[in-house]
Amino acid sequence: MADPKHLARLKQGVSVWNAWRRRNPKLTPDLSRALLIDLDLRGINLAGAHLVRTNLRQTILSRANLTRANLQRADLRAASLRRAKLDHADLTGAVLRHTSLAEVSVEDAKLTDCEIYGIAAWNLKGTPRDQSNLIIRAASEDPAVTVDDLEVA
């Protein structure tokens, strides 16, 4: 569950959040299971944050720093992560349907078991640690097609 103090700080805006992160570099933000739908979080520093099962649908995370973030089972449907940093992040089981991953840095990121139908992924930077069992299907009742490479998908 998200730390209410961390959630309240985030709601003050990206500049307030980033200044707070600079003053508290060793702090690990916990926004797990938070509803962060349709927000403009462009350029936010979420490095190392706990974002397990966080709902980030349609959120703008362009140029966000998500290095070492735990995004397991996060819902990133239709989110924009253009030019974001996902280095060493764990996205196991994340929903990336219709998500923009253009020019994203994915060095050593874990992308196992992600739903990737309709994804836009090009000019990825770095090599993911694992991108196996990427699931492509239009609807949950459709048979799943799996691939092991985002850019091939």
Image (tube, helix red, strand yellow):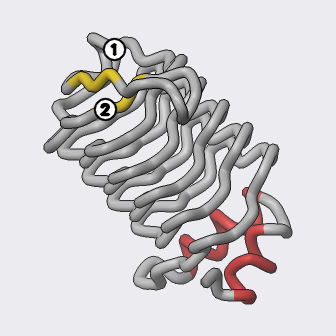
Depth check, front residue: 52 or 106 = 52
Judge left or right: residue 99 versus residue 107: right
Depth check, front residue: 74 or 13 = 74
Judge left or right: residue 35 versus residue 76: right
x then y, percent, for residue 93? 39, 51
Query: What residue is drawn where x is 55% and y is 37%?
Result: 63
Asked which quadrant contains residue 6, the reply is: bottom right
Categorize mark 1 by other alpha carbons within 10 Å: few (<14), some (14-19), many (20+).
Answer: some
Judge left or right: residue 133 versus residue 92: left
Marks 2 and 1 in Cβ contact (< 8 Å): yes
Numbered tag placed on residue 87 in the rendering: none
Query: What residue is drawn where x is 48% and y is 37%?
Result: 84
Q: What residue type is labelled 1?
A: Ala
Query: What residue is drawn where x is 40% and y is 64%?
Result: 70
Q: Earlier in the sequence, mark 2 or mark 1?
A: 2
| Kind of element beneath mark 1 | loop
Depth check, front residue: 63 or 58 = 58
Callout count: 2
x then y, percent, for residue 56? 66, 50
| Kind of element beneath mark 2 | strand
Q: Is residue 144 depicted above or below 2 in this figure?
A: above
x then y, percent, for residue 153? 34, 14
Asked which quadrant contains residue 81, the reply is: top right
Query: What residue is drawn where x is 66% and y is 68%?
Result: 19
Q: Is residue 109 depicted above or below 122 in this figure?
A: below
C-alpha distance separating marks 2 and 1:
8 Å
Q: Residue under circle 2?
A: 134
Q: What residue type is labelled 2?
A: Leu
Which quarter shows the N terminus? Answer: bottom right
Q: Residue under circle 1?
A: 153
